Amino acid sequence: MQGGAGGPDVLPHLAYDEALARERAMLAAAVGDRGEGGPGLAWMLWRTETCIVVPRGHVNRPAFAAAMAASAARGWPVRIRDTGGGAVAQGPGVVNLSMAFAIGADVRERIGASYRILCAPVMAMLRGRGIDGAYRAVSGTMCDGAYNIVVGDRKLAGTAQRWRSLGRDRPGEHGVLAHLAMFADLDHAEAAEVINALHADLGIEAGIDPSSHVNWAEIDIPAGGGTAAAMARELDAACRALRLDALLASEGRDGARPTDGSPRGSGSIP
């Protein structure tokens, strides 16, 4: 689902490999006018099976095959992504937002700007509830990063991005695939336990702390339940309200700096 199709399939369940394939296709097509968010903006909301997603670099660890088998026996099979970062939990309690757009060389702090564009829908949802979200790293969280979305010193969502040059015909422009994984009603105690166990099996220091994370269900519980689905519908509506040109203009062009005080940094899809 790209461009915010809405309707009953706003949060489809995708096999993890299918979700990766759709993200790659979004990045390849991150040009032109499509979607309702203005020129060059598309998005996809999705969730996937219960699993632990790890960077491809973990495959080279001597104990990887045994650790993967042990994790599967615990009910948490391991899936592999293309790029770096740390292990993260996926499953029905996690809502993923994948967003693709083009960004030019005239936007200063392009990595930070791309993260803020990705996070704008969630930040709008928080502001609508009188909550000030922040961007920062939080010790003890899964795949920690400077552009975590944080509420009350606890991580609500993790973010990442991948870039691709748009070629010689569009010098300085890049297609961006940005990804956000937001906790709806994940069992953080179980997620921490299984990731720490996987880390121990791999010889990686285990330090995931469930209390460092927060679920959307702790912020807003929809009438009739169904936190993930209700959150996804609101997130889809917030994506529809985005206007990429306005967001890029607010980030500053031709050397102008953003003035929102957000942190700057770099990153790739973890």
Image: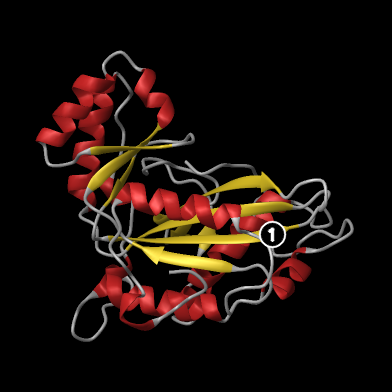
* Residue situated in front as seen by the camera: 164 or 266: 164
The single residue placed furthest to the top in the displayed view is: 62
* Residue situated in front as seen by the camera: 7 or 193: 7
At horizontal 88% and vertical 56% (from top left) the residue drawn is 255
Q: Quadrant of residue 87?
A: top left
Q: Quadrant of residue 47?
A: bottom left
Q: Give x and y (percent) for residue 164.
A: 65, 45
Above or below, 179 against 12 in this view is: above
Above or below, 264 against 248 in this view is: above
At horizontal 40% and vertical 36% (from top left) the residue drawn is 86
Side of 142 relative to 22 (left or right): left
At horizontal 44% and vertical 81% (from top left) the residue drawn is 129
Above or below, 97 against 196 in this view is: below
Q: Is residue 149 visible?
A: yes
Q: Quadrant of residue 100?
A: bottom right
Q: In which quarter of the image is the N terminus?
A: bottom left
Residue at the disc numbered 1: 102
Side of 125 relative to 71 (left or right): right
